Image: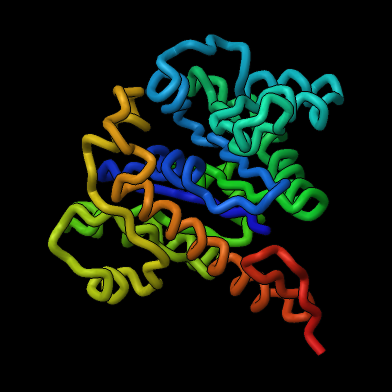
């Protein structure tokens, strides 16, 4: 399957809200899992947003830092995940949509230099050994600096951009930097402004992989834990997120095929060997 990193820039692009919509809508095959890792060095938006401060310090990246120093990183990783999905409705079903909450305080990021590297290795192992998808929320700054290793080792990197003039201007430098460092960068477009996808591609010089609608009411369910409106899971935002998930997996498979033409993974997760 795929390891996909979402990155942002200034201009309030909504990286975490988009990542949560993708997590909850991701097209999962039977027995597969989707893991969203909140790796924003500026701190968690989920802990006090969607989760409304209910977890305290029981889960999150900070605890992995402690585990790494004790040599217990691998085991601790799985204990830090919380289930945001519902499996298939049976009591015995395994959780399938998992969240690794981020930092409760940005100050904690200074102690995570080694953790970022261990996470990058962990995500690759999860994808290779278990066939699970991993989505990495890098926030506005996480694609650069020590946590940038997560973008470098991902199958695909998408910058979340709104099609407004302010957001496009803010995104140009970030997209250019990432394209130079990791290559194969794409855009996840939030359709708030007047510029069509073709114009966004022309300005940023990278493809628009998928588009999500600008839907503030539905987005607040994910960003602030607001009450779900009726039929939330069938809202335009969540429907578009499901389509976006499929497109992102396809983009990751294409990029992997270009980097390693001997072993290209299809969107379904099978490995096809080049002859």
The residue sitting at the right extreme is: 71
Q: Is 9 in front, or is 75?
A: 75
Residue 178 place in picture, x, y as percent: 48, 60
The vertical placement of 66 against 245, above or below, is above
The residue sitting at the bottom extreme is: 275
- The answer to whether one can see residue 140 in this image is no
Quadrant position of residue 113: top right
Q: Is 155 in front, or is 241?
A: 241
In this picture, residue 16 sits left or right of residue 190: right
Q: Is 134 in front, or is 106?
A: 134
**How many marks on residues?**
0
The residue sitting at the front extreme is: 90
- The answer to whether one can see residue 128 in this image is yes
The residue sitting at the left extreme is: 194
Q: Is 89 in front, or is 210?
A: 89
Q: How is the image coloured?
A: rainbow
- Residue at image coords 32%, 48%: 237
The vertical placement of 268 against 152, above or below, is below
Residue 127 place in picture, x, y as percent: 73, 52
Quadrant position of residue 227: top left
Q: Quadrant of the N terminus?
A: bottom right
In this picture, residue 270 sits left or right of residue 185: right
Quadrant position of residue 172: bottom left
Residue 166 place in picture, x, y as percent: 18, 53
- Residue at image coords 82%, 90%: 275
- Residue at image coords 78%, 55%: 128
In this picture, residue 134 sits left or right of residue 233: right
The vertical placement of 175 against 135, above or below, is below
């Amino acid at each position: 399957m795929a390891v996909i990193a979402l990155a942002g820039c200034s201009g309030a692009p909504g990286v975490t809200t988009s990542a949560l919509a993708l997590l909850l809508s991701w097209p999962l095959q039977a027995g597969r899992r989707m893991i969203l890792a909140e790796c924003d060095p500026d701190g968690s938006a989920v802990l006090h947003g969607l989760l409304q401060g209910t977890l305290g310090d029981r889960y999150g990246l900070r605890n992995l830092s402690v585990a790494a120093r004790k040599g217990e990183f691998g085991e601790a990783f799985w204990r830090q995940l919380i289930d945001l999905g519902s499996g298939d409705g049976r009591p015995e079903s395994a959780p399938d949509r998992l969240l690794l909450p981020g930092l409760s305080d940005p100050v904690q990021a200074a102690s995570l230099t080694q953790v970022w590297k261990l996470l990058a290795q962990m995500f690759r192992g999860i994808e290779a050994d278990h066939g699970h998808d991993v989505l990495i929320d890098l926030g506005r700054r996480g694609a650069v600096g020590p946590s940038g290793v997560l973008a470098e080792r991902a199958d695909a990197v998408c910058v979340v951009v709104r099609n407004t003039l302010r957001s496009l201007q803010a995104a140009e430098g970030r997209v250019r930097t990432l394209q130079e460092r990791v290559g194969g960068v794409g855009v996840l477009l939030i359709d708030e402004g007047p510029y069509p996808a073709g114009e966004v591609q022309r300005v940023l010089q990278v493809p628009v992989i998928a588009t999500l609608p600008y839907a503030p009411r539905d987005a607040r369910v994910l960003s602030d834990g607001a009450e779900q409106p009726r039929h939330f899971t069938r809202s335009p935002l969540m429907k578009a997120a499901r389509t976006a998930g499929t497109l992102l997996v396809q983009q990751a498979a294409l990029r992997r095929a270009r980097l390693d033409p001997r072993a290209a993974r299809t969107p379904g997760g099978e490995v096809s060997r080049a002859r």
